[in-house]
Structures are given as structure tokens and as C-alpha cells.
Image (tube, rainbow, N blue to C red):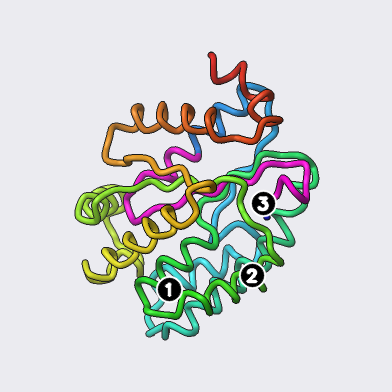
Amino acid sequence: MGSMMRYQGLFITFEGPEGSGKTTQIRRLGQWLKKKGIPCLLTREPGGSRLSTHLRRWILNRLEYHLVPETELFLFLADRSQHVKEILVPALKKGKVVLCDRYTDSTLAYQGGGRGFDLELLQTLNQAATEGLQPDLTVLFDVPVEVGLKRAAARRGKKDRMEREALLFHRKVRKVFLRLSRRFPGRFLVLDAGKSPEQVFQALTKGLQNRLPGVWKKKLERGFRG
């Protein structure tokens, strides 16, 4: 059940392996929507709430200790629970378009595919953390692992914890993302993120035009034609 069945807003999540360019595209789409006068919120996981700012540093970045997989998982889930209640649900109740950089599918891909946790267990934990809030649409930016990691290294220079993982880890992550897209074709819009940013954005707006619920398609129709 997506947000349209519970709230007035529209909930779109952006997923993909490292270096897929999803963060660039979510910002660009947010700017585009605002120019059209459509209220939207850009947020991310981890890091979307006040608590999450601290959790993001603990989970991803450069603290000098070994974070065991179970602790990593529960930190992500704690972040998500706070994020849903503090940020996502209030915005959706106000009728905003919420663009979220990573959500539950990242847990399935990284902690399931990458870390090896049971996917059914992760789905149960996601359900508890989100109280059933699912995206209306998930955009998956797919890119070969080697290409994505090279991009990520060039962009940031210093790698975070996830980017430092072995190549096999990232291949497993991508594999789960693609498996989820095949399992839930009605929710997923898969884009070739290996193309130029402009080409990807054009494919994104065209894909949204074709996939959004009718009420939102009408709201955005003038913008898509522009």
C-alpha cells in the first residue's frame, strides 16, 4: 500500500548502487517541480531527520571502530523509524511530493544482498520501522558496479564505509535491486544510469509521466509538456 492510499501526497523513492547518480537526479527533479509550483520535499536516508544527522555519521563515515552488521542494520532501522514519523508522514499529510534518496529497498539490497541477512526478516523489520508506509513509485538508477564505484571515487575522493566494501559486495547489492524491480514491476521505474545526466533526466521525467497515478499525472502534465 503506497502513500496515495493513505495520504494526499506522493511518495517517490530513489534507489541504486554507489555512483548511480540518483542524488544528482533527485535534486534536479526537486528544482523542476518547484519551478512548476508543486510543493515537494527532498530528503534522504540516513540523514533526513534531526536524529539521523548523527546516525548517518555513525553508520557511514569515518569513525575508527568496527561496526558489526547487526548494529549497522538496527541503526538504519532506527533512522528510518524516526524519519517516517518526523518527516515523511507529516509532509505526505500536507499533500507534498516527497522525494527520498534511499528507503526500504536499500536495506534489502545492502543488508540482504551485501551482508547476507534473510530478505524475509528484513521485510518484516522494514514493515515495523515504517508502519507500512510504502512508496508510490521507486526509481532505480542502474549502473554497472565498476562504473558506479569509479564515479563515486572521483566525486568524493575519500570513500565511506559502504564504498570501501569489496567488489563482490556491490555486485550482490545490484543483483538484489534488479531482483526487486522484477518482483515489483508496478512500483519500479528502472533507468539506465550509465547515460549522460541530461539523458537520464529526460528518461526520468518521461517515465514519471507514464507511471504516476492519474491525479498526479494531471497535476504535472503541463510541466511534462514544458
- Are the residues at dot 3 and dot 1 in contact (C-beta closer than 8 Å)? no
Q: Nearer the viewer, mark 3 or mark 1?
A: 3
| Crowd band around label 2 with a 10 angstrom C-alpha radius: few (<14), some (14–19), many (20+) | some
What residue lies at 46% left-to-right and 68% top-to-bottom? 108
Label 3 sits on what residue type?
Gly
- Nearer to us: label 2 or label 1: 2
Q: Circle 2 is placed at which residue position?
A: 127
* Residue 37 higher or lower than 81, as above or below: above
- Left or right, 194 with respect to 71, comes to left
Q: Amino acid at mark 1?
A: Gln
What mark, if any, has residue 2 been given in the picture? 3
Q: Position of residue 226 (x, y in %)?
A: 53, 14
Which residue is the site of mark 1?
Answer: 111
- Pick the quarter of the image with the N terminus: bottom right
User: What separation in Å lies between label 3 and label 1 (alpha carbons)?
Assistant: 23 Å
Image side of residue 149 versus residue 37, left or right = left
Which residues fall within the magenta stretch? 2-26
Q: Give x and y (percent) for residue 92.
A: 74, 47
The 10 Å Cα crowd at callout 3, few under 14, some 14 to 19, many 20 or more, is some
- Where in the figure is residue 102, as x and y percent of width and height? 50, 56
Residue drawn 70% across the image and 55% down it: 87
Horizontal and vertical percent position of residue 125: 59, 76
Q: Which mark is residue 88?
A: none
Residue 119 is covered by the magenta coloring: no
Residue 37 lies in quadrant: top right
Comes first in the chain, label 3 or label 1:
3
Mark 3 or mark 2: whose residue is earlier in sequence? 3
